[in-house]
Image (cartoon, rainbow, N blue to C red):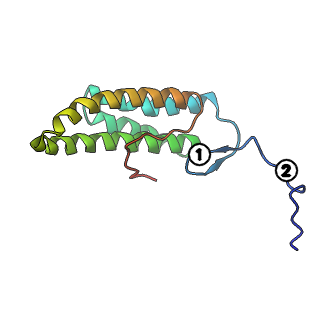
């Protein structure tokens, strides 16, 4: 026997786990929640000028990723989502030839807006989030 006993080790219920299964120690601060929210909402700047939807989350992630695992996770997720939206628009433009691209091009902006706001709110609550229909380029 290895001497392991379940009673020897107490469970650490204060640990937080990301959806990828990574454990994050400690509490998530208000400052971390604020920056995670900005990372998600930064994608909405693409409504002003398209490339900003990727540039703003990228710059925020690159400047904040080393401060906490929570910010690193949210930055990657926000950036992956914005890149994925751009790819879905390109795919929809190609699919216009089959007519299916037209409803996709109508639906994508609504999906983008709603999901960005929902995930920003959830990140501000201190939750780890995963966007649907997202390619995970940055892991």
Q: Which mark is residue 134?
A: none
Instruction: Between residue 58 and residue 93, name the one nearer to us.
Output: 93
Q: Which residue is mark 1?
A: 18
Q: Position of residue 98 (x, y in %)?
A: 12, 44
Could you tell which of marks 1 and 2 lies nearer the N-terminus? 2
Quadrant assignment, res 46: top left
Residue 138 in the image, given as x and y percentages of width and height: 42, 52
Which mark, residue 10? 2
Residue ID at (30%, 34%): 52
Position of the N terminus, as image quadrant, is bottom right
Position of 132 with respect to 122 (left or right) is left
| SS at badge 2 | loop
Which residue lies at the image location 85% right of the left edge and 50% below the top edge? 10
Report crowding for label 2: few under 14, some 14 to 19, many 20 or more residues within 10 A (C-alpha). few
Q: Residues within 10 Å of mark 1 (few under 14, many from 20)?
A: some
In three-dimensional space, the C-alpha distance between marks 1 and 2, rounded to whole angstroms, equals: 21 Å
Q: Is residue 113 above or below residue 21?
A: above
């Amino acid at each position: 026997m290895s001497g392991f006993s379940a009673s020897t080790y107490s469970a650490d219920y204060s640990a937080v786990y990301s959806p990828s299964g990574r454990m994050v120690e400690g509490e998530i601060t208000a400052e971390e929640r604020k920056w995670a929210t900005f990372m998600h909402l930064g994608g909405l700047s693409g409504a002003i000028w398209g490339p900003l939807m990727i540039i703003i989350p990228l710059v925020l992630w690159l400047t904040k990723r080393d401060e906490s695992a929570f910010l690193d996770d949210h930055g990657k997720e926000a950036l992956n989502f914005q890149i994925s939206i751009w790819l879905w628009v390109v795919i929809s433009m190609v699919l216009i030839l089959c007519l299916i691209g037209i409803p996709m091009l109508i639906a994508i902006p609504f999906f983008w807006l709603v999901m960005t706001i929902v995930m920003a709110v959830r990140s501000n609550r201190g939750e780890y989030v995963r966007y649907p229909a997202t390619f995970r380029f940055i892991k």
